[in-house]
Image (cartoon, rainbow, N blue to C red):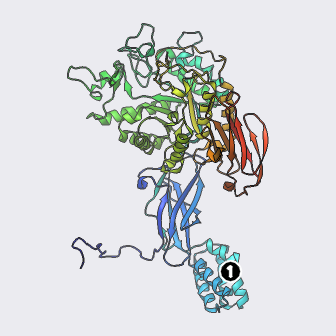
Amino acid sequence: MKSDFFQPAPLRSELSFDGRRRVIIDRVSPEIDGGRFPAKRASGERMIVEADIFTDGADTVEAELLYRPCGAKDWVSVSMSPLGNDLWTASFITGAPGSYEYTVRAWVDHFLTWQKGLKKKIDAGQDVAIDLKIGAAIVELGAARAKGEDAGTLHHHVGILTVGDPVTAVDAALGEELTAAMQRCPDKSIATMYEKVLLLQVDQRKAGFSTWYEFFPRSWGSEPGRHGTFRDCMTILPRISQMGFDVVYLPPIHPIGQTKRKGRNNSLVAAPDDPGSCWAIGSADGGHTAVHPELGSMEDFEAFVREAELNGISVALDIAFQCSPDHPWVLEHPQWFRWRPDGTVQFAENPPKRYEDILPIDFETKDWQNLWTELRGVFLFWIGKGVKIFRVDNPHTKAFPFWEWAIGTIRDAHPDTVFLAEAFTRPKLMARLAKAGYTQSYSYFTWRNNKHDLQQYLTELTRTELRDFMRPNFWPNTPDILHEELQSGSRAKFIIRMALAATLSSNYGMYGPAYELCEHLPVAHGKEEYIDSEKYEIKSWDLDRPGNIRAEITAVNRIRREHPALQQTADITFVRIDAGEGREHEQLMGYVKRSDDGRDVILTVVNLDDHHTQGGWLRFPLELFGLPHTQQFMVEDLLSGNSFTWNGEWNFIELNPHHMPVHIFSVKLPS
């Protein structure tokens, strides 16, 4: 007796589909949230697509990946290859920045099915006379579809299969000429098209590979203590370029409010000559589309952007959607802010902290449409001034639908823009910002400091769906974050964290000159903030101070530029390093990266212990390259210039942190 709870699936009353489409296409990857959001690649990167593809019975299946720019009429087709277990793959190299779409098509190939069956019968010694006539009919249909020389070739083979002597007919049936001609005119009349057309966002090259340097323009005056200008900053661009950085990121360059201005070390009362926090945006001199008068004019800023480009550097601007109480928007659009019962505007606070110099914007305002348009207009204004890269402050505290709309519409007109999300927040919020359009994301790298945590985090970033839409940008420090790992002032630790950021991620950055000068004093014990923070005062830097690591940074950045293997993040393999008695070494970490074409192989080994020499036996994964475990090969340390011959997969590694805590090996394998 059937349960009362059993309800059979409803039958379709009408067959409104073509049931002859027998091929199943499933689990297409990448597919972000069922196709709701695009996958991401940088221009020139390889886009790999995989899918489960199969049909009933033993028929032979063929499949192709289709892709095109959004709005284009014709698809570009790439044949897919089987990987085993009904998994198929294909790839293509991405083109110019913009929006693309892709899907998968598959069909039963009756010619290949026939050809495979024919060979089995021949191998079994069976009569194939009828089979040849069946094949002739299939080839004749192919001739009707074919064009040019292929049509003639196929008509010729129809004759051979129909009236030729058996030996000649069999040779022709299994020959390369017939197979190739039929493959060029497959019968796709009842092919299965995947049920969705998926989206791909192709970004400019620096979205996938970039090296960022953050500095405060106001600290670069021609005289100590004098407010720097854009013209002053032009003089340091060659130095930054020579160090190997190709993006300079400027904290907010806008007028700074006077009301509740912060003093040095974030004090609540500012002295008359304190410049204030540049994140307290807006004064009588303007708001988010103005420059601070002491930095110079708008023409000076545009000249700075042009000079940076001449030095191979792109300028990135900080966009912080918050306002000083003096911002013009507070007077012109009071409805965009929250007001308290006593008639005062609600400032930002995170008890016990109070940020009275900053007013958050109310994204639940009834005037949200005008607000959204105005905020998007800030990006468009600076794009008009030559800026294409933006670091956005605390985007997770603004409405997610706004970002999806604003970034999407901006990219429609300016597909080469890059947006970096400064969101040190919960994982799902970070992921959603990336899905909503952010090109790059700050990450948890700063707080991943031991071997286990680093390897686990990189595995999450590169072996889950995150790899297809969230690009990490690793920063060992920022003006807000001086991690306790750096507070010891160990020069080796600064080199270690820089080298990890630069070789684990294809995008990395640092706040300088604090980093290369190994600034390490916190405002207080247990705090991650710099004492005498540049956020609240004008500093004067001695760039040649003893103990700096400028040479090491320059060397690592040069290696990154010269080696494509380090210009991507996703292809990373962690290697085993033994400390003895079969124990995994906890202080030595090694990992292999390969370029897209497989020609460039880099092995990085880092001693995470900044005080003691560490040694161990490293196992190089020769099986990744199809080589035997006993293979002899060469490695060159790109930092020291020394070369070594390694005999087989196990080799001894030792690193003295007081000399150099890092090996970056170029691995020379036999072809």
Question: In this rendering, does residue 98 appear at all?
Answer: no
Q: In the picture, which quadrant includes the N terminus?
A: bottom left
Among all residues in the image, which is located at the extreme front? 581
Query: Residue at the spot x=55%, y=26% of the render?
Result: 486
Q: Residues within 10 Å of mark 1 (few under 14, many from 20)?
A: some
Residue 44 placement (x, y as % from top left):
61, 47
Of 429 and 195, nearer the camera is 429
Question: In this rendering, does residue 605 appear at all?
Answer: yes
| Residue 29 left/right relative to 309 | left
Residue 611 placement (x, y as % from top left):
63, 28
Against 475, residue 128 (above or below) is: below
The answer to which quarter of the image holds residue 607 is: top right
Residue 494 placement (x, y as % from top left):
60, 27
The answer to which quarter of the image holds residue 213 is: top right
Among all residues in the image, which is located at the extreme top? 272
Q: In the picture, which quadrant includes the C terminus?
A: bottom right
Against 44, residue 403 (above or below) is: above
Of 640 and 469, nearer the camera is 640
Q: Secondary structure at mark 1?
A: loop
Query: Residue at the spot x=27%, y=22% of the render?
Result: 345
Q: Which residue is mark 1?
A: 174
Residue 397 placement (x, y as % from top left):
37, 34
Against 46, residue 235 (above or below) is: above
Query: Residue at the spot x=59%, y=9% of the render?
Result: 223
| Residue type at the position of mark 1 | Leu
| Residue 603 left/right relative to 107 | right
| Residue 590 left/right relative to 287 | right
The answer to which quarter of the image holds residue 140 is: bottom right
Query: What is the count of numbered marks?
Result: 1
